[in-house]
Image (cartoon, rainbow, N blue to C red):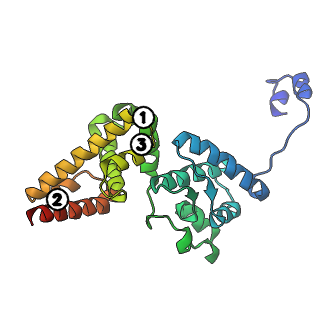
Amino acid sequence: DRLVEEGLFRGDVLSRIGERIDVPPLRDRPEDIPLLVEHFLGIVSRELGYEISVVSPKAMNLLCRNRYDSGNARELQMEIRTAAGKAMLEEDKVLRAGYLSDRLRAGIGDPEAQIGADDAPRGGEEIPAEPVAMLAVLRKHRFQVRAAETELGYSHKSRTLSNHLRGLCIEALSRHGWDTCASAASLTGDDRPEVVMKVQRKMEGYVKNAAGNITRNTESRLYRNLPAAYHDALGRMIDHLRRCGAARDA
């Protein structure tokens, strides 16, 4: 109407468009949220190459009670995208309340928003959103770091993505009992042998480098440039390699 008044849009064309559809904000139509959750989860699962088949009742309750004041349906979509990525890193097929953002849970503002043990992330710790996005892009580019860096907007000289990839590999190894083949298959989410082998070789290199530093008593170097989110997993790797060394010596 404003454009017609300003002479920037033809009034006869506007009249031919037909009935107008007013879409109320998401907070005014909570009955649509479960349908949108299912829709967005399907999209995100295809993007990640990892199917999340179930939304826990606690997570769905929190999603339905959020007001979505800042982004309407787009806010819901981003919440699902981040939570699904966290579930994928934990190899969890259930989107649990523990994978939802602190901001969403804080917005509910009552004891119902607290997470019980049954609905906490499998690993027991929050997974940062940043590595989730990085892993999705790495998978998209079959773990070609340069191509992934270009899409993410990182400089190759910064080695930001390479440092996160090292951390993701160490975390995967920790979850899979230091089995490089199983860990690589889990991290890539890919059935193409060349992709799995590429990541497996990286993991073997990380393990060899760690073992060498432990032998030289310079394991503190392993923490350099490694994002803090992966320090616990690295500590577990160091302990594991020390035990292996002690067993060989015995």
Above or below, 193 relative to 76: above
Q: Amino acid at mark 1?
A: Arg
The Cα atoms of the two marked residues, 2 and 3, are separated by 28 Å
Mark sitting on residue 188: 3
Disc 3 residue crowd, few under 14, some 14–19, many 20+, Cα 10 Å? many
Front disc: 1 or 2: 1
User: Residue 228, image x and y in percent?
Assistant: 31, 58
Q: Amino acid at mark 3?
A: Thr
Q: Earlier in the sequence, mark 2 or mark 3?
A: 3
The quadrant holding residue 100 is bottom right
Residue at the (40%, 45%) spot, across then down: 185
Mark sitting on residue 192: 1
In the displayed structure, does residue 112 sit left or right of residue 192?
right
Residue at the (66%, 60%) spot, across then down: 63
State the SS at label 3. helix
Residue at the (58%, 67%) spot, across then down: 106
* Residue 159 appears in the rendering: no
User: Residue 11, image x and y in percent?
Assistant: 89, 25
Foreground pick, 165 / 1: 165
User: Residue 18, image x and y in percent?
Assistant: 91, 31
**Label 2: which residue?**
220
State the SS at label 1. loop
State the SS at label 2. helix
* Residue 154 appears in the rendering: yes
Residue at the (56%, 49%) spot, across then down: 81
The quadrant holding residue 135 is top left
User: Residue 8, image x and y in percent?
Assistant: 79, 24
The Cα atoms of the two marked residues, 1 and 2, are separated by 35 Å
The quadrant holding residue 244 is bottom left
Q: Amino acid at mark 2?
A: Ser
